[in-house]
Image (cartoon, grey):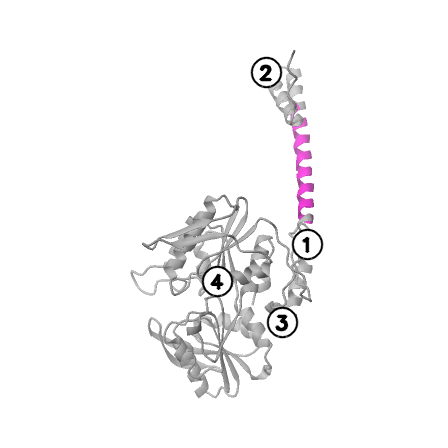
């Protein structure tokens, strides 16, 4: 008995290969040239048919995976109708453009939970698990299972305890005090573990980026540690970085991979707009010349308030001497805006100058609350009406004082992760 002929799993490909083989072995002449042209014609028709089929399939896939994001009741954007309206306007504009990825809009009433694809995985480092939990709650999912520990000699061990093959992995880890170097090394080891587990992409969500202030050389023979850490993250295997209020925007240029810069001031802005301030009484104060661009954008969003600038001269690291005040603050509510508060010397000295110049209330606002000693004593001395920060860095009871207000950026980062995962714009967060 003869064995049956094998099934032809790819008849079109077999036909094309047979035609190509015949054209190679046939003798030269008109017939062979006509056979070769016929094979090329069939190959062109097959390729165009395959391209049309793939295009239709991709369109069907984009329609099936189109989702609409909604917000939870504690979302900071739900407190500001103008923020919700701008997000919906962004969604409507993007949906009118042909062949664009679907943009998720915010519903005016927060009720439903946010759907997500199965390949989205979020893992937390050991630096700030509370913030990672808030992000996971916003996304309506559980954090990925992992083991992170240190050996007796201080070496970091990381193991991913679930399959992430083909997944988009997001690693949430601020490289913040009190263990900046340990947190950064732990992030590098997490990246390596995920890369060796065959994930599709690795996005590092870094709420606070350590070494961001070492972004240039102030004198000879100094290192530029911001560039060094950028190279380490890239070489470890990260495919994208999400940052929150980087100290200097030029640090983004140190990376050879995409960087999404998120403004944490939008959370502070929503909080301030909920207060009963008279627009004519407000003035936004930049504590130094370098923060003028940030303060100007913030003032424009905050009732188009006027701008004042404190001219200071540093006498050493973590030391500052206030020299002069540019602008009018007499009888006004001063909003001092900075990206971080370290020892609090700059803000405290500036607040004393504002009080001497006639300011009736002083609010200090910053995204990153580093609070190196003696920041708590300085900020809680009574010179500030309120100190407003975010939880980009873990907050502990020993860093608390009566004037302190801590706002969450969990929903902001969760929305950013969802948009990055779905290849939709993150421009909803611009100041």
The crowding category of the residue bearing disc 4, from other C-alpha atoms within 10 Å (few below 14, some 14 to 19, many at least 20), is many
Q: Which mark is residue 97?
A: 1
Q: Count how many numbered circles sit on residues in the image.
A: 4
Residue 140: x %, y % from top left: 60, 58
Mark with earlier residue (2, 4)? 2
Residue for point 69% across, 48% down: 64
State the predominant SS element of the stretch in magenta: helix
- Percent across and percent down for residue 153 are 31, 54
Contact between labelled residues 4 and 2, with CB atoms less than 8 Å apart:
no
- Whether 144 is among the magenta residues is no
Residue linked to disc 4: 207
Mark 2 or mark 1: whose residue is earlier in sequence: 2
Where residue 126 sits, quadrant-wise, is: bottom left
Left or right: 124 in relation to 228: right
Q: Quadrant of the N terminus?
A: top right
Residue 50: x and y, percent? 66, 35
Q: Which residues are magenta?
A: 39-63
Dot 3 crowding, Cα within 10 Å, few <14, some 14–19, many 20+? some
Q: Which tag is nearer the camera, tag 3 or tag 2?
A: 3
Contact, mark 2 vs mark 1 (Cβ under 8 Å)? no
SS type, badge 1:
loop
* Callout 1 crowding tier (Cα within 10 Å): few <14, some 14–19, many ≥20: few
Nearest to the observer: residue 184 or residue 249: 184
Closer to the camera: disc 1 or disc 4? 4
Q: CA distance from mark 1 to mark 3?
A: 29 Å
| Residue 276 drawn at (x, y percent) | 60, 82
In space, the residues marked 3 and 4 are separated at their CA atoms by 22 Å
**Residue designated by label 2:** 25
């Amino acid at each position: 008995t003869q064995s049956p002929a094998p099934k032809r799993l790819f008849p079109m490909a077999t036909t094309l290969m047979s035609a190509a083989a015949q054209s190679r072995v046939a003798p030269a002449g008109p017939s062979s040239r006509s056979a070769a042209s016929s094979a090329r014609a069939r190959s062109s028709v097959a390729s165009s048919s395959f391209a049309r089929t793939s295009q239709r399939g991709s369109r069907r896939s984009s329609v099936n995976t189109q989702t609409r994001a909604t917000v939870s009741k504690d979302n900071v954007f739900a407190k500001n109708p103008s923020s919700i309206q701008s997000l919906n306007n962004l969604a409507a504009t993007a949906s009118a453009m042909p062949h664009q990825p679907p943009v998720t809009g915010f519903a005016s009433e927060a009720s439903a939970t946010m759907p997500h694809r199965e390949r989205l995985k979020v893992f937390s480092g050991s630096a700030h698990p509370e913030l990672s939990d808030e992000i996971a709650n916003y996304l309506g999912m559980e954090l990925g299972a992992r083991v992170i520990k240190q050996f007796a000699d201080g070496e970091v061990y990381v193991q991913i305890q679930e399959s992430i093959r083909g997944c988009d992995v997001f690693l949430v880890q601020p490289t913040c005090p009190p263990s900046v170097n340990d947190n950064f090394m732990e992030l590098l080891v997490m990246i390596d573990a995920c890369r060796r587990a065959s994930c599709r992409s690795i996005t590092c969500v870094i709420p606070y980026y350590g070494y961001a202030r070492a972004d240039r050389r102030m004198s000879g023979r100094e290192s530029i540690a911001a560039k060094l850490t950028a190279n380490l993250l890239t070489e470890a295997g990260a495919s994208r970085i999400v940052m929150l209020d980087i100290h200097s925007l030029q640090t983004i240029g140190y990376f050879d991979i995409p960087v999404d810069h998120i403004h944490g001031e939008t959370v502070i802005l929503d909080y301030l707009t909920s207060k009963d301030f008279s627009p004519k009484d407000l003035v936004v104060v930049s504590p130094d010349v370098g923060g003028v661009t940030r303060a100007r954008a913030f003032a424009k969003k905050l009732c188009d308030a006027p701008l004042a600038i404190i001219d200071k001269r540093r006498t050493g690291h973590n030391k500052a001497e206030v020299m002069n005040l540019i602008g009018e603050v007499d009888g006004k509510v001063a909003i001092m805006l900075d990206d971080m508060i370290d020892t609090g010397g700059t803000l405290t000295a500036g607040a004393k100058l504002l009080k001497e110049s006639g300011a009736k209330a002083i609010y200090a606002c910053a995204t990153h609350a580093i609070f190196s000693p003696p920041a708590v004593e300085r900020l809680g001395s009574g010179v500030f009406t309120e100190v407003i920060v975010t939880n980009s860095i873990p907050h502990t009871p020993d860093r608390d004082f009566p004037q302190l207000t801590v706002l969450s950026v969990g929903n902001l980062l969760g929305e950013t992760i969802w948009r990055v995962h779905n290849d939709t714009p993150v421009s909803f967060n611009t100041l």
